[in-house]
Image (tube, grey):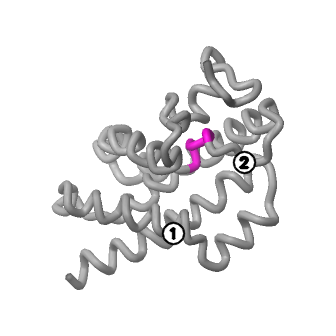
Amino acid sequence: MFKEKNLRMSNPVHLLATGFGSGLSSFAPGTMGSLAAIPFWFVLIALPNPFYIICLILSFGFGIYLCGRTAKEMGVDDPSCIVWDEFVGLWITLSLLPKEAHTPLWITVGFLLFRLFDIWKPFPIRVIDRHIRGGLGIMLDDVIAGFFAAMMLFLFHRFL
């Protein structure tokens, strides 16, 4: 059913690493994973800020394990079907968005900024993407893209 070698959606680690299957899209799996992260973000924003930050940190650490293990079991360094890193990157992007800006417009701007930085990979994202392997490498480039996008989103919202 899946073209991805050794990927088992019955395995909870693989299910989470693929963003509940959103990364299995044949069209732009990273974008589909980022879109799939939005409903979960609505749950996260209901938490007080300290808990939101704790969830981000735990999601990053857990993601290192999820992504690393899934990639290893698939025998591929950074398979495109792994999108947990997109989930966390988008959650970071939207983390600085003030509550009054939790609107479709600003969520879309955040989504587009995150995708821009994730695809473009400006310095140091590209260096990390090329030189750090395993779960940490899979996660870290998207986390930094999320920070870049969060700063841009914050500045756009503040000054526009």
Q: Mark 2 and mark 1: span between their CA atoms?
A: 17 Å
- Is there CB contact under 8 Å for labels 2 and 1? no
Q: Magenta span: helix, strand or loop, mainly?
A: loop
To which quarter of the image does residue 108 belong? bottom left
Question: Does residue 41 show up magenta in the picture?
Answer: no
* Element class at badge 2: loop
Quadrant position of residue 156: bottom left
**Horizontal and vertical percent position of residue 44:** 36, 43
The residue located at (69%, 40%) in the rendering is: 67
Q: Observer-nearest residue: 120 or 152?
A: 120
Residue tagged by mark 1? Answer: 117
Q: Is residue 72 visible?
A: yes
Q: What crowding class fits label 1: few (fewer than 14 Cα within 10 Å), some (14-19), or many (20 or more)? A: some
Q: Can residue 87 be seen in this view?
A: no
Q: Residue 69 — which label?
A: none
The residue at which mark 2 appears reads as: 78
Amino acid on which disc 1 is placed: Phe
Write the residue at 49% across / 44% down. 27
| Amino acid type, residue under disc 2 in the picture | Asp
Quadrant for the N terminus, please: top right
Q: Label 1: state its secondary structure.
A: helix
Q: Does the magenta stretch include residue 83?
A: yes
Instruction: Left or right? Give the position of 154 relative to 31.
Output: left
Q: Where does the magenta region start and end? A: 81-85
Tell which circle, 2 or 1, labels the residue nearer the N-terminal end.
2
Residue toward you, 11 or 7: 7
